[in-house]
Image: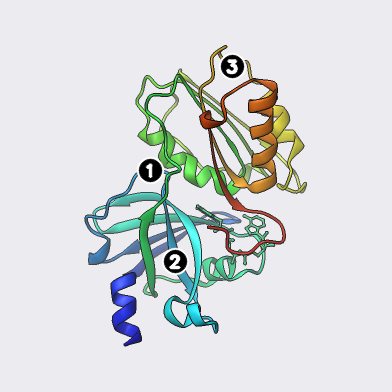
Amino acid sequence: MKQRLLDRLLLAARVHAVEQLGPRLRLITLTGPSLGGLAWVPGQHVRLQVAAGPSAVDWLVGTLRTYTVWNHLDQTIELIAVDHGDGPGAAWSRTVRAGDQLMLLKPQGSFVTDASAAYHLFAGEETAQVAYGPMLRALSAEARVFARLEVDSPEDRIELTPGQNPNWDLDWDYRHGRSAASAPTLVAAVRRLDLPPEPGVAYLAGEARTIQLIRRHLVDERGWPRRNVRTKPFWTPGRKGLD
Ligand SMILES: Cc1cc2nc3c(=O)[nH]c(=O)nc-3n(C[C@H](O)[C@H](O)[C@H](O)COP(=O)(O)OP(=O)(O)OC[C@H]3O[C@@H](n4cnc5c(N)ncnc54)[C@H](O)[C@@H]3O)c2cc1C
């Protein structure tokens, strides 16, 4: 019975490849017939079974963790996992190997770009950049973009776009061991931006407290309407498995 329930809820996939992109970054490619033809909007995520677990819900689906879809082509889904400690998701990303089988929920989420935005503003840390890559690739060549990314070191950067676009102002900074939580330097980088006078649409993902600080800056100091700031907290100290 359990297997029949799982088959209805979850998609079965196989790990096709695991590639080390940097010391803390792994590109994990999943494949399988059930991944073909899935609806996916860049910015959406999947929930993966990263471990079995003992609770009632876990009996059914196992321990789930959330990862943004970096790319979806034919019967493959690519994810990028950031290594950051000993939680079940991080442990899975360190031990996963080609040939492993796993189950996942289909792509979901409303953290996607707004084609009608006057311009687009992205800010975030290591995990946020995984969402921003596909969102940036989905924008038209004419779209105006500002992005401020802060990662621990240059090795933690992901190549977000295939080429340089003159309409895009992307810049990176490095924490060099400082925490990504409540990151004042990332807020300061957004504050320094010389943005057009009218509000654009901001996309703020990653660590939850930093997101709140940047949203406060945009709404209280720049006077942006709240609806122009799209947020998606991915993690925060002391909380497990945010979705
Ligand atoms: C919509 C969404 C999309 C996401 N996309 C991605 C993605 O593409 N790639 C990715 O790597 N992660 C992504 N995440 C974050 C990922 O789901 C979390 O990092 C997840 O909590 C990791 O699970 P875990 O079992 O390793 O840690 P948990 O058991 O959930 O947490 C254990 C501890 O680790 C801390 N922690 C969790 N994540 C981080 C981190 N990134 N840096 C520092 N400390 C952390 C927590 O605060 C907690 O104290 C996404 C999350 C959401 C909600």
Residue annotated with mark 2:
48
User: How far apart, in angstroms, are the residues tagged by discs 3 and 2?
Assistant: 38 Å
**Picture coordinates of residue 42, whole percent (x, y):** 38, 43
Residue 42 tag number: 1
Which amino acid, by three-letter code, is at mark 3?
Leu
Q: Mark 2 vs mark 1: which is more N-terminal?
A: 1
Residue 195 tag number: 3
**Picture coordinates of residue 168, whole percent (x, y):** 49, 22
Q: Residue furthest top?
A: 197
Residue 182: image quadrant is top right
The answer to which of 166 and 203 lies nearer the viewer is: 203
Q: Helix, strand, or loop for circle 1? A: loop
Q: Mark 3 vs mark 2: which is more N-terminal?
A: 2
Q: Helix, strand, or loop for circle 3? A: loop
- Please report contact status of discs 3 and 1: CB closer than 8 Å, yes or no: no
Q: Helix, strand, or loop for circle 2? A: strand
Which amino acid, by three-letter code, is at mark 2?
Leu
Is disc 1 surrounded by few (<14), some (14 to 19) or many (20+) residues within 10 Å? many
Total tally of numbered discs in the picture: 3
Quarter of the image that includes the N terminus: bottom left
- Please report contact status of discs 3 and 2: CB closer than 8 Å, yes or no: no
**Picture coordinates of residue 21, whole percent (x, y):** 51, 52
Residue 241, compared with residue 44, is above or below; it is: below
User: How far apart, in angstroms, are the residues tagged by discs 3 and 1?
Assistant: 25 Å
User: How far apart, in angstroms, are the residues tagged by discs 2 and 1?
Assistant: 18 Å
Dividing the image into four quarters, tell me where ligand 1 lies.
bottom right
